[in-house]
Structures are given as structure tokens and as C-alpha cells.
Image: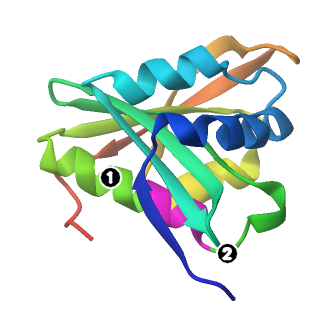
Amino acid sequence: MAEFFVREMNWTDVPKVLEIERVSFTTPWSELAFLKEIYSPYSVIKVAILDGEVAGYICASHLLEEGHILNLSVHPDLRRRGVATALVEKVINELRMKRCRSLFLEVRVSNHGAIHFYERFGLMPVGCRRNYYTQPTEDAVLMKLDLDSRESS
């Protein structure tokens, strides 16, 4: 299997990121949404590169002592190869370096695979956001990780 590496996302990555976004989500982010994250001083935004191409991406933000994973996806043909794991680990470590004490994210209540995936990092369900998602309308599970309680990877 080919090796991949993780680096900062830049504006030239956005067209490929949008391709992955559109095949992954029923309500995909826009080009402008990604560009805003790239240029925000409060964002942690990464891509995984495999054979010179974007294989996946993650967008997170931080404010004071709180981090939030906003978006994560891997190209459907490249899933289950450790790309998402590497992206999440990179963000967790960077948020720790930024002195964040907690990390939050939302995931569709029906997305059991994603919930289990995030639980592997120690994120735990702490609440529900009613009707958070559209197309279809669905609740979100709010998950949290206490960044102070786990050692850095």
C-alpha cells in the first residue's frame, strides 16, 4: 500500500477537497466555506496526500480552550487505510499544543461507524442536537474529548 502524509490545506487543494466533499455529504460545504477556514487564524485544516493527490481532509477550529472538529472526509476509494485516523490524530495533537482542554464534534445519530471511530480516540457522547442535520433531517450526537486526560500521541 502506498504511503500518505498529512500537511496544511492550501487554496490549491480546494477543488479536490470539494470533489470528496460532494461525494461524501448530502449538504456539502461550499468553496467559500473551505477558503474561510484556510485563512482563519482559529482553524486547524489539514489534507492527507497519497500519490500526489488529496485523499482526505479535516477542518477543525479552536477558540480559547475549546476545539471543534467541523468536517472530516476521505475519498470513498481510499477509506479504511488509516487516512482519517492520521488526520484526527494530527488535529488532536495540534489542539493540545494550542492549549485546548476539550474537543467537540457532531455526528449523525445514525452514523454508527463514525461514532465508533471517534470513540476509539476517547470521544464520548455527551448530548444531542435536535434536527441538526438536513437532507435528511436528523439529530446529531454531540461528542467530547477531554484533552487534559489523555497523553499526547
User: Compared to 46, does 129 lie above or below?
Assistant: above
Q: Which residues are magenta?
A: 82-88
N-terminal label among 2 and 1: 2
Residue 32 location (% of width, % of height): 57, 15
- Residue type, numbered disc 2: Arg
Which amino acid type corresponds to the residue marked 1 in the rendered image? Ile
* Whether residue 33 is situated above or below residue 153 in the rendered picture: above
Per the image, label 2 sits on a secondary structure element best described as loop
Farthest bottom residue in view: 1
* Foreground: disc 2 or disc 1: 2
Asked whether, in this view, residue 41 is left or right of residue 17, the answer is left
Please tell me which residue lies in front, 101 or 33: 33
What residue is rendered at 14% in x and 41% in y?
98
Q: Residue at x 57, y 82 (%)?
A: 3
Q: Is residue 95 magenta?
A: no
User: Residue 25: x and y, percent?
Assistant: 79, 32
Q: Main secondary structure of the magenta part?
A: helix
In the displayed structure, does residue 148 sit left or right of residue 28? left
User: Which residue carries the number 2 mark?
Assistant: 81
Spatial CA distance of label 2 from label 1 is 19 Å
Q: 90 or 4: which is nearer to us?
A: 4
Residue 69 lies in what quarter of the image? top left
Q: Is residue 3 left or right of residue 29?
A: left
Which residue is located at x 84 percent, y 64 percent?
Answer: 77
Q: Quadrant of residue 145?
A: top left
Q: Is residue 79 visible?
A: yes
Q: Label for residue 92?
A: 1
